Image (tube, helix red, strand yellow):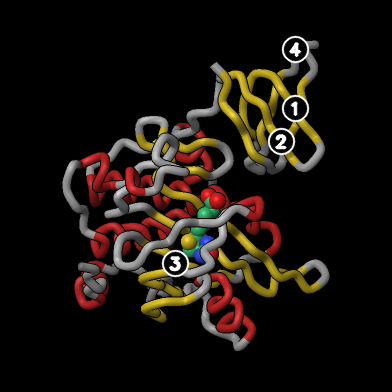
């Protein structure tokens, strides 16, 4: 049986000023990204949150699907309107907020695989996707999509069973989607505010990076870089020390951790 999210419980726990205050709750949609885009184009206020119980066409990064069964997990998109200089902090703030929410609300220890996969015990528990609309130099809006596996029976999805996990798998019992969601929205606003004032959010994100010090292969389209992930710069780009000693900066991409 699929249980509907209790929005009253979420609202009781919300401490934000604007994130999640305008909340659109959908039983089913193709992708919360699409709904949020329409909202953003119709001048929805910053922090507007589109949440769905089920997505029939959930999207992941790099054109991959995001498995989105009904009533199990969290699928949400935030409409944000950052100044262009703070656009990149969204991809630091989102995984950090998810990690902090899962720790606070479910007691899980979370790490981050650069740039923004949230891992528990080396398996992915959450991911995020940012889609942006720019007008020249200005950001019209950024859509911060987050998918968090809460009560997903990951073993029932053989295509991801080895690489994915959920709160339920980690705890051996169901977690509270309401508590995770409220903690996530609270952490997102707090960390987004931090990120505009100083480097606390960046340092917290960096300290969770599973990737640093590891041998990696980073793929960005046709480009492949291999070496040791030495550090990240203030923009969140990954600095890879190649075998020949040179240092290369990778701004985005897909990283495989090598043994
Ligand atoms: C990834 O790790 O590949 C990113 C996954 C992002 C999934 C979320 S679920 C809510 C929002 N709607 C989508 O279609 N995708 C994002």
From mark 4 to mark 1, how far is it between C-alphas?
A: 10 Å
Disc 3 CB within 8 Å of nearest ligand 1 atom: yes
Q: Residue at x 25, y 73 (%)?
A: 4
Residue 185 lies, in percent from the top left, at 37, 63
Tags 3 and 1 in contact by the CB under 8 Å rule? no
Identify residue for label 1: 225
Of label 1 and label 2, which has the lower sequence position?
2
Element under label 2? strand
Secondary structure of residue under mark 1 = strand
Residue corresponding to mark 3: 76
Is residue 46 shown left or right of residue 142?
Answer: left
Label 2: few (<14), some (14–19) or many (≥20) C-alpha neighbours in 10 Å: some
Q: Is residue 193 visible?
A: no
From the image, tell me which residue sits under label 2. Answer: 219
Circle nearer the N terminus (3, 4) = 3
**Precedes in sequence: disc 3 or disc 1:** 3
Q: Report, in whole angstroms, how far the alpha carbon at label 2 lies from the one at label 4.
A: 16 Å
Q: Quadrant of residue 259?
A: top right
Residue 250 or 187: which is nearer the viewer?
A: 250
Tell me, for residue 243, which label it has, or none: 4
Tag 3 secondary structure:
strand
Q: Is residue 99 above or below residue 130?
A: above
N-terminal of the two: label 2 or label 3? 3
The answer to whether residue 167 is above or below residue 30 is above
């Amino acid at each position: 049986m699929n249980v509907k999210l209790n929005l009253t419980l979420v609202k009781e726990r919300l401490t934000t000023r604007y994130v999640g205050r305008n909340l659109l709750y959908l039983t089913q949609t193709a992708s919360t990204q699409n709904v949020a885009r329409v909202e953003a184009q119709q001048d929805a206020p910053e922090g507007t949150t589109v949440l769905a119980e089920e997505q029939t066409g959930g999207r992941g990064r790099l054109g991959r699907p995001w498995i989105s069964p009904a009533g199990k997990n969290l699928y949400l998109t935030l409409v944000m309107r950052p100044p262009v200089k703070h656009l990149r902090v969204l991809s630091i703030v989102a995984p950090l907020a998810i990690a902090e929410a899962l720790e606070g609300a479910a007691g899980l220890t979370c790490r981050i695989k650069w740039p923004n996969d949230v891992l528990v015990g080396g398996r992915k528990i959450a991911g995020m996707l940012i889609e942006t609309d720019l007008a020249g130099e200005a950001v019209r809006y950024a859509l911060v999509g987050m998918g968090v596996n809460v009560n997903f029976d990951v073993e029932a999805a053989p295509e991801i069973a080895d690489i994915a996990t959920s709160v339920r798998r980690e705890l051996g019992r169901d977690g509270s989607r309401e508590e995770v969601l409220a903690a996530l929205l609270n952490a997102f606003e707090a960390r987004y505010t931090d990120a505009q004032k100083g480097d606390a959010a960046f340092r917290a994100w960096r300290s969770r990076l599973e990737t640093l010090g590891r041998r990696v292969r980073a793929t960005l389209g046709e480009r492949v870089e291999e070496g040791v992930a030495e550090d990240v710069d203030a923009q969140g780009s990954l600095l890879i020390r190649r075998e020949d000693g040179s240092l290369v900066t990778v701004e985005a991409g897909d990283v495989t951790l090598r043994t």
